[in-house]
Structures are given as structure tokens and as C-alpha cells.
Image: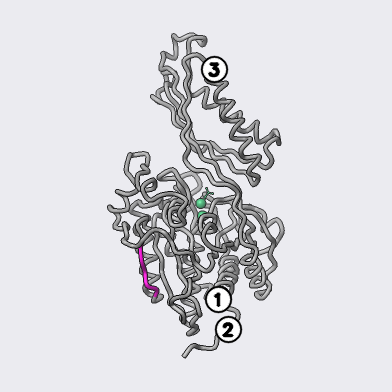
Amino acid sequence: MTSPTPDKLTVDSDRLWQSLMDLAEIGAYRDERTGLRGVNRLALTDADAAGRRRVGAWMEEARLSVRIDQMGNIYGRREGADPSAAPVLTGSHIDSVATAGAFDGCLGVLGGIEVVRTLNDRGITTRRPIEVAVFTEEEGVRFGTDMLGSAVAAGRLTLEYAHALTDRDGRTLGGELTRTGFDGPADVRLAPPHAYVECHIEQGPVLAEHNVPVGVVTGVQGISWQEITIHGRAAHAGTTPTRLRADAALAAAQIIVQLRAMVDSGAYGELRATVGHLNVHPDLTNIVPARAEMTVDLRNPDDTHMVRAEEALAAFLRDLEDSQPGLTLATRRMAQTAHVPFDKSVQKTIAQAADDHDLPYIPLLSGAGHDAQEIAAICPTAMIFVRGEHDGISHNPREYSTPQACAHGVNVLATTLLRLANED
Ligand code: GLV
Ligand code: MN
Ligand code: MN
């Protein structure tokens, strides 16, 4: 007998918060300069594996049946009254950058598990199954391509491509899946769910500026990642005249300054540009650098502006090479995704749920990349954003959303999932 189904769900905010804090213990570190506690759980490291095991245990405690696919993506399934109906999927990631807080990705995964716990407590059976996903290497900072697990699950990238990616020490993703025991047997290609909804912290200042607790996410802006390797010539720092130098570090600096000039020019719309990785070789005081390796991260809500920015950067690199004898530049594409708009009808369901919880909301475009942008290729998808403190700072141990803010977002998630899971 199916229990009468309520139309609205409120989760246990203390239990949700406790899970967030417990998971943040795994991979915790103390930031030397600020003394703040942060999280370092790069994908498929021992810390990430420990986090995955903890989340898997929570899934089992919540009576989810757990499967792991060939990318290490973890899915916990709560059966519906009609097991043959396509499930409603929720989730996110628990891998982190090296200087993370407790919330990025984890809120979506633990929020999903908290929704299941709440459905269990209330004895509710939904018509459709509900599945909670943990996607592998969302951050892309260990193996160089972001949203990796979800991109393979949705079919944009191949399993072979992903397994062959290496970290900076030359370890392959495939090898690390095996080493950590997360090379699962389930087929990586995800059968299209009925819908996908992801709850995530905003990671920016917009919700706080508008003084609203919740955002209904309209889509994700375009992302372009590439690696540039500059070859110059090692030479003596004291004796080599400036005219005889091919200084790879100087070229790297010129690229960084050029990127900022492109942003400031306003000619590329709302372009953002970041060089987050820069290495020089041989990295010694009295040697003109022979080589520099750097990454360029471009974001743009407008695909046309993004293409023009990429072309302008490529032209600058060609000019740089031509203008400095002895200098050669090579680029390697790491990741590239266009602007992804989210499904209007799922956005409407989220907005209605927010209204029904008396939570003011605004629509907004995501500045960060998310697994939802990949799953959007195979089913109607949208996201819920939760307000952050300190200007929404993220990828920083200061990242913080209050227990109440997290509960607001997960309440909206719960009601949205409930309604979608009872659709025909
Ligand atoms: C994910 O955190 C991203 O880089 O947007
Ligand atoms: Mn994230
Ligand atoms: Mn992140």
C-alpha cells in the first residue's frame, strides 16, 4: 500500500548539516596563512576514496541500492512504485579542489541523500525511482578535464579518453580507479532519466546582493580550458644580454597581462580569464627560464564572444612567437563547453517549490561549471542555487553557507524531486 503522498517536503536540517560537517573531516587541512580549516580531496586520491566510502555507507544506511560504473560514478537508487519508469536523478560531486570548503558539490550529494532519508522517515513511495549520483572528477583539477564523470555518462566524452588522462605525476585516471577500488562494473552510459535536478552553492555574490536565499539556475556559461607550453632557451642570468634571451617566463607574463587587457577591453562581453597554473623550468634563480607551462581558463555566457576571445588569444600567441626569436609556443585543449541553457519546465517546478516554501528566489546563470550541464544533454535538467556568505567566495576554505541556507536549498530540492518523481 502506497502512503498518501504529500505535495511538499521539509528535510531535517540538523542531519543535513551534520553530514556536511562529517564529510568535511575527510581530506581536512589547516590553511597555514589564515588558520582556517579547508578540504583537499582531489579526485581519486586516498582522501576522495575515503569520502566516497563514507557516502556509499550513508547511501546504504538510507536503503539505496548502490552501483558504481566504469568511470567510478556512484548511483544510489530508491525504488519507485513503477520500477520500469525512468528515475528522477539528483546529485553532484564530492571531489574537491586543493583549497576547498565543505559545500561545493557536497551539498548536492548529501542533499540528495537527505531527501531520501526524509522520504524514508515519512514512508513515502514515489511513482518513479529516485537516484542520487556522485560524479567523478567534476573539478577537473587532477586529470585536466572538468565534469569528466558526467560527461562520459552523458556520452559527450569517451571512456577511453577519460581513462587515459594523466595527473601531473603521470598516473592515469583508469589506474587510479583500479587502485582505489572504484572501477565499477556498471555501464557508464546513463539511460536517460526522467529529469535531473542539482542543488549547489552559488559560489558567487549574486543571491546575497539580491538578498534572496535561493536561485533558479537558467543555465551554465561557456568554459574553455587550454594548456600553453612555451619553449625558450636556458641561459646565464648574469652574462646573457637581453637581446640574446628567449625568456619563457617573460612570454608567460605577457600572456597573462594580455588576457586581463582582453577582459578589461569589454570587447568580449562578460569574458573572465584566469591563469591558475604556471610553472617555469628549470626554476632556478640564475637561469633564464627555458620553458613555461600555464593553463588558461576562459568563461563567457555568450558563445560568439567566447569564440572571438579564443581567436584573439590564438592570434596573440602567434604574434608573440613571431616577435621573439628562439621562442616557440604549443597549445593543448583540456576542456571546452558551450553555454548550456536549462529546461524551462524543470526551472518552473523549482520556482513553484521555492514559492511553496515561502522562499524568495531569482533566476540566474551559473558562473561555475556543473555536472548538470552534461546531464542536460540527455534529459530535462535544472539547478537550485544556495546563497553563500563572504561574497559567495568558493574554492577557498572561507566558502560558507549557513545551515539555514543549506536547508532552504535542500527543501526546495526535496519538493522538486517529490513532484517530478510523481509525474507520469
Ligand atoms: C568548477 O568548479 C568550475 O571550475 O567551474
Ligand atoms: Mn561544484
Ligand atoms: Mn568547484
Residue at screen point 44% across, 22% down: 231
Residue type at the position of mark 1: Leu
Q: Residue furthest bottom?
A: 1
- List x then y, in percent, for residue 205: 65, 53
In the displayed structure, would residue 224 be above or below residue 358? above
- List x then y, in percent, for residue 402: 58, 64
Residue type at the position of mark 3: Asp
Disc 1 to disc 3, C-alpha distance: 60 Å
Residue at screen point 41% across, 65% down: 75
In the image, which is nearer the foreground, mark 2 or mark 3?
Answer: 3
Residue, disc 3: 322
| Upstream in sequence: badge 2 or badge 3 | 2
Residue, disc 1: 418
* Residue 323: image tag: none
- Along the line of sight, which residue is nearer the eye, 257 or 25? 257
Indicate left or right for 191 with 219 as reference.
left
Quarter of the picture holding the C terminus? bottom right
Specify few, some or many for label 1: CA neighbours under 10 Å numbering under 14, 14-19, or 20 or more: many
Read off the magenta span: 64-68
Q: Tag 1's secondary structure?
A: helix
